[in-house]
């Protein structure tokens, strides 16, 4: 594995391990919202641990019978983990919707039980989708010299629709609704508050946060899924090299998720500092306020 790809895999593992350790260790972070982030971090961690190194090794080996089988297994788990990550992002956006748009019913609707159901749905739906794509593609397999990082198959198009386009549409729609409500609430506060500067900063922060959330998701994943969708229609005008490059860009989303969904919050930053400085191994800090 090349140094750059090895570094990407290492950074994905480190970033998501920080998130997982923080949520599991610090009691202040034991909330329904953070359990969704924990599920997302586990998914992204597995991408860094298995998919990236596995993909790199298989792509440079001759495609014998064992390698061909391993390649199919790799592809199945790749679809499974990437789709699970997208579904988790979708449920996180739903949690954000209730936080901003329906705060009065948030605690009643977004309970630990409800979050567990969301997590099970995300992982189960992703598993069913990945297995279905694999089974549909068995009769389209082609013998190649190497196990390609991306295997373009017409059977994968329904998976792209249900695994990316529909969740992406849901995420963009939900966040647009959140931004609209947050903007309206800020305007309402502005009419009552004396300081316009504080409200302006509130609007700017909300705008930046939502722009980063949606922007990172679309910029890292859209190029791959769009090129994969239009490849059969382009009569192979889209080079597989570009599709593979877009695939690596999509995998980098597993590195950026911890930054977007965790590093923005001061209690996570405090938790990371304690973990990196190994203070949690010197004394019991599980009840820290993380201010």
Image (cartoon, rainbow, N blue to C red):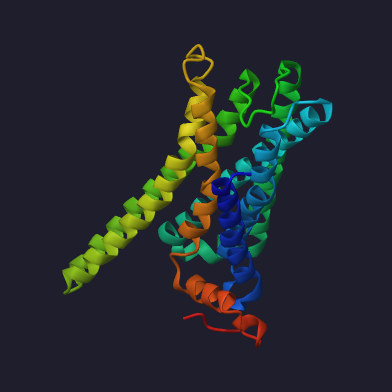
Q: Residue at x 37, y 46 (%)?
A: 176
Query: Residue 138 at x, y = what percent?
Result: 76, 21
- Number of marks in the image? 0
- Viewer-side residue, 97 vs 272: 272
Q: Is residue 4 visible?
A: yes
Rendering quarter of residue 66: top right
Name the side, left or right, on which 42 lies relative to 210: right
Q: Residue at x 65, y 56 (%)?
A: 42
Q: Position of residue 9 (x, y in %)?
A: 60, 51
Is residue 165 shown to the viewer in this render?
no
Q: Quadrant of the N terminus?
A: top right
- The quarter holding residue 133 reads top right
Q: Residue furthest front?
A: 3
Q: Position of residue 79 (x, y in %)?
A: 65, 37
User: Is 262 situated left or right of 283 in this image?
Assistant: left
The residue depicted at 56 percent of the width and 63 percent of the height is 33
């Amino acid at each position: 594995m090349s140094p750059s790809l090895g570094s990407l895999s290492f950074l994905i593992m480190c970033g998501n391990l920080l998130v997982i350790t923080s949520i599991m260790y610090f009691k202040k972070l034991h909330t329904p919202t953070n359990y969704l982030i924990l599920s997302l971090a586990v998914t992204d961690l597995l991408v860094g641990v298995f998919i990236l190194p596995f993909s790199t090794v298989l792509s440079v080996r001759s495609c014998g019978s064992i390698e061909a089988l391993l390649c199919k297994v790799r592809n199945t788990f790749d679809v499974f983990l990437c789709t699970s990550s997208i579904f988790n992002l979708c449920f996180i956006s739903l949690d954000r919707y209730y936080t901003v748009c329906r705060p009065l019913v948030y605690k009643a609707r977004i309970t630990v039980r409800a979050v567990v159901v969301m997590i099970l749905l995300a992982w189960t739906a992703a598993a069913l989708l990945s297995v279905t794509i694999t089974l549909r593609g068995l009769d389209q397999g082609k013998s190649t010299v190497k196990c390609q990082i991306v295997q373009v198959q017409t059977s994968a198009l329904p998976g792209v629709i249900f695994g990316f386009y529909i969740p992406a549409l849901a995420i963009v729609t939900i966040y647009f609704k959140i931004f609209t409500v947050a903007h309206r609430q800020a305007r309402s506060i502005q009419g009552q508050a004396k300081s316009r500067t504080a409200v302006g900063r509130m609007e700017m922060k909300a705008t930046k946060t939502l722009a980063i959330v949606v922007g990172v998701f679309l910029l890292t994943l859209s190029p791959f899924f769009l090129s994969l969708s239009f490849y059969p229609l382009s009569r192979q005008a889209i080079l597989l090299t570009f599709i593979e490059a877009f695939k690596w860009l999509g995998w980098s989303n597993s590195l950026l998720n911890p930054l977007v969904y965790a590093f923005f919050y001061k209690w996570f930053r405090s938790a990371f500092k304690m973990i990196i400085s190994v203070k949690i191994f010197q004394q019991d800090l599980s009840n820290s306020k993380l201010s």
